[in-house]
Image (cartoon, rainbow, N blue to C red):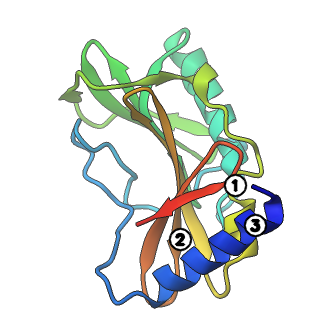
Amino acid sequence: MTRRAVAAVCSALLTLAACSGGGNADSSRATDPGAPGQSSSAAADPGGGSATSGSVDVERIRPAVELLERRLGGQQRYVEVNVTQTEVNLFVVRDALVLAYVVRDGALDEPTDTGEPYSGPSFAASQLDFVPSVIDVVVENMTESDVVAFSATARQGGIDYIATVRTSKREFRVLLSADGGVLDTE
């Protein structure tokens, strides 16, 4: 599908989602092992920058992963990695438990609890194959909306890439391919 066709599909999907009378597809999910999710804050800058309004910077994910893996001493297995406007959240499987690490203002915060049992799918950082422009089609086709989170979530056989979009009326999620193609909305 051409970029112009993807843009047209995205525009139509975003218009339908924004106008939908359906319930709020809240992007926040509980951090239990069945549904690791975002913290309640809005994306982090591992380099120490401050939050800005507008869409998140997906390029903050890889430096946050590198920081965590340096601290923990090597490659990790992830259930989810997400970026918001103030932080990057990293849900790591260690010893059959999911632990939630946060990178905020260039610093790695340790988990605040002992984790939850987990035996589901996970991925390595090397499997994160999204392009830096992954949310561009969504951003370019929004009016009065922002991408407030971007997540990479483990599923059987791969990774789901999801942009969470906030309008003045609601939030909804856009499932993306690694190259930014729109696959679905919720």
Give residue 115's quadrant in the image. top left
Identity of the amino acid at label 1?
A: Asp
Q: Residue furthest front?
A: 1
* Mark 2, other Cα within 10 Å: few <14 / some 14–19 / many ≥20: many
Q: Earlier in the sequence, mark 3 or mark 1?
A: 3
* Residue 18, x across and y down, in percent: 49, 85
Spatial CA distance of label 3 from label 2 is 20 Å
In the picture of the structure, the residue carrying the numbered disc 2 is 165
Dot 1: element: loop
* Residue 86 as seen in the image, left or right of residue 98: right
Q: Is residue 52 above or below residue 183?
A: below
Spatial CA distance of label 3 from label 1 is 24 Å
Looking at the image, is mark 3 or mark 1 nearer the viewer?
A: 3
* Mark 3, other Cα within 10 Å: few <14 / some 14–19 / many ≥20: few
Identity of the amino acid at label 3?
A: Ala
Spatial CA distance of label 1 from label 2 is 13 Å
- Residue ID at (48%, 17%): 76
* Residue 175, x across and y down, in percent: 51, 55
Q: Is residue 175 above or below residue 132?
A: below
In the picture of the structure, the residue carrying the numbered disc 1 is 57
Q: Earlier in the sequence, mark 3 or mark 2?
A: 3
Between 165 and 117, the one nearer to me in the picture:
165
Identity of the amino acid at label 2?
A: Val
Dot 3: element: helix
In the picture of the structure, the residue carrying the numbered disc 3 is 5
Between 184 and 62, the one nearer to me in the picture:
184
